[in-house]
Image (tube, rainbow, N blue to C red):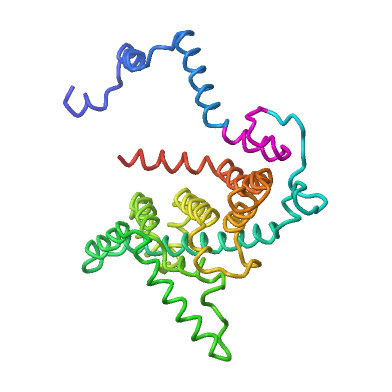
């Protein structure tokens, strides 16, 4: 039989049987040994201990929110005397105060909600468009501009705080003197979210890494089909980078939701306050140092309302965080 004939000859049955057996033997060698019941029990106990360690502060906050004055810091697992500290009859001091009767907490929460949503949405899509440009396009000095962008991450926000405030103050005086333009300067909520329309260096870097992991053949095939660059960005890049987009949105939403410095600088009217700034006002009003009667249960109730939405948000989108970490891990 010639060499060509040997290539086309059927494989003997014995050889066909030996190949799967060899593969199965190699798989058995690579399989990790099962954990013993003692090791598994120790692992479960360690996980339970760590869970209690991390969950106890949140449980303490929930319990303190339903305790009356004088029992807020007693460290009991459940309140000995339950008190509804969120709403109720508004009584003058020294009677215990109620959260929704002493401050417009609902308005503060709504202000924080829409400001955080606008800021997170703007940062997510602007950063994604810039990241896609750095990942897909080839233009002169691309690496240099990307290096300059990353260098801005080393600039602390406190350095630009005063210059940015002076700019918004100047813009505010200009819009006040103009009969048509809306007032967007100091004592408005625009400085709290409008800077996010310029994106963020960290989020651009994060999303660029996801875009670089997308095979370039997808975009080349789309170009051959007549898609524009915006269509490729919308139909290919954004759906495949969904974990990065959600991580960016949730992180920026959380950052704006708990932001205290920016509202403290720009806001003066109490109706424009965000939830963190409102909680700070309540703390100054009701603690003993500020001349209050020590209504810390009101502060704990407000803190619970401030923290609870972010806990629900992270619990709802935890699978995208895990998927993003796994995707980055596969890239090496």
Give the x, y percent position of residue 284. 59, 54
Give the x, y percent position of residue 154. 29, 57
The quarter in which the N terminus is drawn is top left
Query: Which residue sits at x=61%, y=63%?
Result: 273
Nearer the observer, 228 or 300: 300
Residue farthest along the right direction in this orientation: 89
Relative vertical location of residue 332 with respect to residue 35 in this rendering, above or below: below
**Residue 43 left/right relative to 156:** right
Query: Image quarter for residue 297?
Result: top right
Relative vertical location of residue 102 with respect to residue 198 in this rendering, above or below: above
Residue farthest along the left direction in this orientation: 2
Relative vertical location of residue 310 with respect to residue 322 in this rendering, above or below: below
Relative vertical location of residue 192 with respect to residue 70 in this rendering, above or below: below
**Residue 72 left/right relative to 247:** right
Q: Is residue 217 magenta?
A: no
Q: Which stretch appears magenta?
A: 57-77
Give the x, y percent position of residue 227. 43, 67
Q: Is residue 69 magenta?
A: yes
The quarter in which the C terminus is drawn is top left
Nearer the observer, 41 or 233: 41
Query: Which residue sits at x=59%, y=36%?
Result: 58
Query: Image quarter for residue 176?
Result: bottom right
Numbered disc total: 0
Nearer the observer, 77 or 154: 77
């Amino acid at each position: 039989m010639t060499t060509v004939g040997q290539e086309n000859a059927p494989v003997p049955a014995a050889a066909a049987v030996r190949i799967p057996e060899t593969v199965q033997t190699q798989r058995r060698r690579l399989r990790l040994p099962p954990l013993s019941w003692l090791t598994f029990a120790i692992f479960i106990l360690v996980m339970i201990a760590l869970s209690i360690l991390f969950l106890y502060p949140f449980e303490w906050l929930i319990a303190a929110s339903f305790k009356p004055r004088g029992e807020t810091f007693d460290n009991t697992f459940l309140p000995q005397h339950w008190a509804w500290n969120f709403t109720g009859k508004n009584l003058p001091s020294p009677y215990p105060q109620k959260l929704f009767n002493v401050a417009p907490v609902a308005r503060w929460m709504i202000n924080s909600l829409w400001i955080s949503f606008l800021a997170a949405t703007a940062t997510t899509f602007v950063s994604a468009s810039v990241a896609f440009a750095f990942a897909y396009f080839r233009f002169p000095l691309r690496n240099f501009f990307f290096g300059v962008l990353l260098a801005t991450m080393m600039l602390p926000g406190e350095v630009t705080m005063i210059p940015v405030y002076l700019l918004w103050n100047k813009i505010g005086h200009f819009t006040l003197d103009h009969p048509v333009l809306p007032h967007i300067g100091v004592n408005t909520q625009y400085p709290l979210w409008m800077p996010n329309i310029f994106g963020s260096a960290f989020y651009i870097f994060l999303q660029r890494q996801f875009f670089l992991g997308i095979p370039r053949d997808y975009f080349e095939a789309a170009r051959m089909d007549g898609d524009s660059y915006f269509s490729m960005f919308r139909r290919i890049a954004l759906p495949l980078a969904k974990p990065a987009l959600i991580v960016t949105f949730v992180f920026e939403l959380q950052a704006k939701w708990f932001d205290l410095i920016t509202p403290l600088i720009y806001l003066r009217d109490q109706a424009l306050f965000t939830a963190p700034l409102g909680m700070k006002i309540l703390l100054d009003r009701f603690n003993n140092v500020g001349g209050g009667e020590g209504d810390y249960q009101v502060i704990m109730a407000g803190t619970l309302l401030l923290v609870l939405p972010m806990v629900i948000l992270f619990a709802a989108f935890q699978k995208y965080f895990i998927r993003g970490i796994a995707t980055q891990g596969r890239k090496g």
